Image: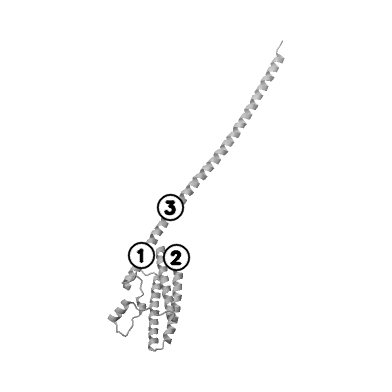
Amino acid sequence: MSQDPWLQNYDANCRLAQEIAENIHERNRQQRTGGNPAKINMTLRASLQKLKQNIAHLKEGLLRASSTRRLMQSEADRRQNLIDDLLTREKQLNATFKGDIAEPEPSRSTLMGAGAGTSGGVVANPWLINESEETSGLTFGEIKQQQRRVIEAQDAGLDALAAVISRQKIMGKEIGNELEEQNEIIDDLAHLVDKTDDRIRNETRRVKLVETKSASCGMLVVIVLLLIAIIVVAVWPV
């Protein structure tokens, strides 16, 4: 599994910051010994400008990843802390380069290490001891493994989230299909009710027509019977 591009850029910028620190240390050494630091000053200005631009790109990359929710909140916070630390170091390097602050003094452990492993005339570079507690005592390979484990944990979390979203999508489709079936049943019932209502109206009209005809026929029978009775009475001898 390849390393995250953002972390690769961060590592590259950490190495650039370390290189700048070493160059500042060398520039100061040349100034103390009467050398000409003009060339190294030019290199330092370009490197500091590049470091500043790279940190801005790291910020933009983290902002994009956070806004698209490609990172867990804990990892986004961790990376923001890394950027803050790198930004603090960039400001310290700029101030040291300009002479606003003095170069950090070597710690006691650094001096003891220098006395044991280097010659007495060489001063250890104090910038080399800046290391976070998380990576203190770890080799570069172990740091990469640690970062890989973090990325794998993030990938596992994203896979779990994708599985949940997939299940919700399937459930949504099933609910939609059920609603469509229910709507079809309701439409069929409405159509059947309309047909039944039409039939009831037709039958009602027929009943009324039959009633009207029956009433007319009854009146005709009564009239005929009355006529017959009148004729019989008229022709019946007294």
Identified at 59% across, 36% down, the residue is: 202
Q: Tag 1: residue type? A: Glu
Q: Tag 3: residue type? A: Met
Q: Position of residue 121 (x, y in %)?
A: 32, 85
Q: Position of residue 161 (x, y in %)?
A: 40, 59
Residue, far top? 238
How many other residues sit within 10 Å of disc 1, few (<14), some (14-19) or many (≥20)? few
Q: Position of residue 178 (x, y in %)?
A: 46, 49
Determine whether the residue tagged by mark 1 lies in a helix, strand or loop: helix
Q: Quadrant of the N terminus?
A: bottom left
Determine whether the residue tagged by mark 2 lies in a helix, strand or loop: helix
The answer to whether one can see residue 72 in this image is no
How many marks can you see?
Answer: 3
- First reached walking from the N terminus: tag 3 or tag 1: 1
Determine whether the residue tagged by mark 3 lies in a helix, strand or loop: helix
Which is more foreground, mark 3 or mark 1? 1
Question: Residue at label 3?
Answer: 171
Residue, far left? 116
Q: Tag 2: residue type? A: Ser
- First reached walking from the N terminus: tag 1 or tag 2: 2
Q: Point out which mark residue 152 bears.
A: 1
Question: Residue at label 2?
Answer: 66
Identified at 44% across, 69% down, the residue is: 61
User: How far apart are labels 3 and 1 at the CA level?
Assistant: 29 Å
